Image: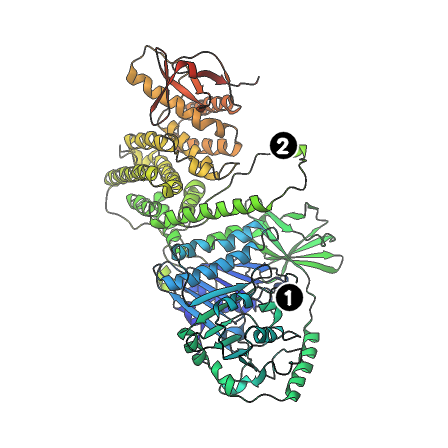
Amino acid sequence: MSDPISILDVIKRGGYEASLITTFNATLPFYEEIVLRKLVAAGCRHNVVLMDQSQCAISWASEATRPRHAGHAYTLLPIAAPGAFHPKICILVGQKKAAVLIGSHNLTLSGFGYNREISNWIEIGSTKDGDGAAILAAAWRMARQWIEMQRGKSAEPLLDAALALGEFVNPFIVNAVPAGNVFALAHSPSGTSLIDQLAERVTSNVQRIGVIGAFFDTELALIAELKKRWPMAEIVVGIDPESVQMPGSPSPGVARYVDARHLWTDNKNYLHAKAIYFEAGQDSAFVSGSANPSRPAWISQASNGNVEAVLLRIGQSAIDTATEVGICGLFDLDSVGEEVLKNVKTRTAIERASNEVDPVPLLIGIANHESGNLDITLRADLMSFDHVVLLGADMEEISEVYSPVSSDGVLRLSVKDELTLVRACSLYSGTSLVARVMVHHPSVISARAQSTRQYQIRSALNGLGSTEGDISKVIASVQRVIFSDDTHREVTAAMRSHREKESKQADEIVPDTLAISVSDLPKEKKKIRLLKSGDLAYLLDVLLRRIREGLELSTSETDSSGRTEEERVGQEDEDVENPPVSMLPATSLDDSKIAQAVASRAKSLTNAMLAQLKHAKKDTERRSSVVFQLIAVLALVRELRYLDKSPRWKKTGCLLVAEGDRRRLFDESLIHLLGGDMRLFDSIELASDGGTEEGVQLRVLLLWLAWDLGDELTDHIDRLGERKELEPKLRTNAAFLKLMPPISCDMNARADLKQSIDHTVKPTPEAAERANIWLKRHLRFGVEWQDGYVESGNLCVGGYCIVPGKMPEPRVIYEISGGTICFWDFDRVRRFERCRVSAVEPNVVN
């Protein structure tokens, strides 16, 4: 064979931030102690393993093979398939490079170091590497499909953790086009068979076919199929008579069987490689990967077909690879005797009988650290158990729960303080073990899965609480994330994924009945979170949810050994843990100069945001991403206003965000979000019938900014007042009419708005009371309008109107002039004949 590829050496090169490895079986302690350690030491923080479900259950059955850190240090997702989940791919992705390995190696010590394996190593040097990007795109498409196979079978947080790899992959594949002579092919029971995919791309003029493999089916179905499709070709099958699994007897005249050990006399290890070479001159083809020469691997069967992955090379690349691997030498070897094949068949039968295992089922538990609950999804046939044993990282017993009660197929345990220690559970009926449970900790996985840039985000935001750092640098750092090209790609990918999911559900979901439970009627539709991962998603999460927690984190730039994050790359420590958060470096500027610099940066941020909003009105592709950008900008402004109230910055006499900039941000954002025929707000709100989390967040932040600017409803409009005084009041009323009703009936949104106001109100009892009165008054206004409107017959300036058939949403009357009614439509004044306009008022139910 060619020079060995060490996957561990590929990893050790560094530059990767995320990995995904698929395998049939695995020595999970080997992965955790060797592979994962090297991945983390090289800077790879988001790590996922997909493994055959039955083999995963077998791993948990033995003390020597069960994992210790699954669900805590990395994501382990068992995959169920009718036959076997058998692909062996490895995806490594960083900011500037990526790599894909497609081969025959399982995630075991033997697979990574001792067996005779064939693996294809493709490097992607940048996002402009077209051929490499095509293979990466195909590999990720396969992996994503396998993950989605578990939808409805595994817990959503587990699937989300695995799918989060897409945020690392997407920048490389966004413009990928199919490669010309190299193809990554996948086999699944419900899809096109591998043999059919191969036949589409391999010429009919094949002179010779060379096959090597470790496992065959009883009928030797693939060998017969090759002869059927390429009848003129000579077929030679290379085996290792001492280790091959071949339960059937070859049919005469179909193929010759040879001892492949003669090809690699210097390597006497177990032959686990799988490859087929089609010799056809310049049209030759070479295919290798996970697929053994067997029916379940190559020929579709819905009942017991495997999931497989192979790489096909056509033309000169195939010839060069076959020569380098040495498979061409098969044609020169003598056939083995019938006695050898009989011995192989006998040994295979004995080994298969001794290897039959009926493992205890493996279930998935999801740890919710906020509630302290552990939710275990049960199987329909696993409802009989009377106590649960909670286990730690070394499978030591932590505690027991007796007489647990399940509901709707979910067993919920209240673990609270012990939850962070729980790695697994065992379910018992008396003294009999019923099932094992792998516990997944989404919050821990999410924290570990941050990219280098996300660590930089956290580090920069931590500077908001610094007593020495120049926080103007924080704004510059955050601004780079908000307006980067990656941000647009993240949002585009998230919206595309959501639309595909919605379309698929619409096509597939057919209700069993039109009847609904009365108890379901009051339930509010769950709001969809569109952007779940990526740098912008992380920034939003920190700004909106965890920034004040983040300010309390460790501020050390080094680890316990005194090393920086860069110095830790390549080092393999005993404990695998995240790099700590760092602070901004100290600055020599005084606070007044810093405040002025921050205000200047804030003005620049505002200008950039408004420019993006204007650009998005013309560029339809950016209409979604600009809304997410605006949420981030508003959230950052809110945090700066929080700092404005602190004694340190109050002493400077300079606001960190000038009122004029906040006013422009509010007024012009409303114009672009709510005005015109193509309202930017709709770009995310129309993504879900139940609304989106981001839509709620944007409304809350805009309402907070209105409060921060001192805006409030005007109940009585003086029509004789000055025009310049009247217009702002009417526009403010129009803004509250649009923003407040959806918030007033959403308890979580109301709480968020109150928290934002409480967070930034002046620290005096009088200010707190005024804020409370403002909030109650405007929420009451929203409640009045949430049930719609009725016609009132009273058209007046400052009142409300609709234009039936044209403008069904209420608008604020701006002016009444003769036979014309004018109302404010955020970006302009609209005029209609009085006869077409109807006055309305809220449909208040007493």
Rendering coords of residue 704 (x, y %): 40, 31
Q: Residue type at mark 2?
A: Leu
Q: Is residue 117 visible?
A: yes
Rendering coords of residue 584 (x, y %): 32, 49
Left/right placement of residue 787 relative to residue 174 reads right
The image quadrant where one finds the C terminus is top right
SS class, disc 2? loop
Rendering coords of residue 16 (x, y %): 40, 62
SS class, disc 1? helix
Between residues 208 and 455, which one lies in front from this camera angle? 208
657, above or below 566, in the image: above
Tell me the residue that label 2 is attached to: 521
49, above or below 717, in the image: below
Q: How many marks?
A: 2
Tell me the residue that label 1 is attached to: 58
| Residue 757 picture quarter | top left
Q: Earlier in the sequence, mark 1 or mark 2?
A: 1
Left/right placement of residue 154 relative to residue 540 reads right
Q: Is residue 38 visible?
A: no
- At a point 48% along the width and 85% down the height, the residue shown is 329
Mark 1 vs mark 2, foreground winner is 2
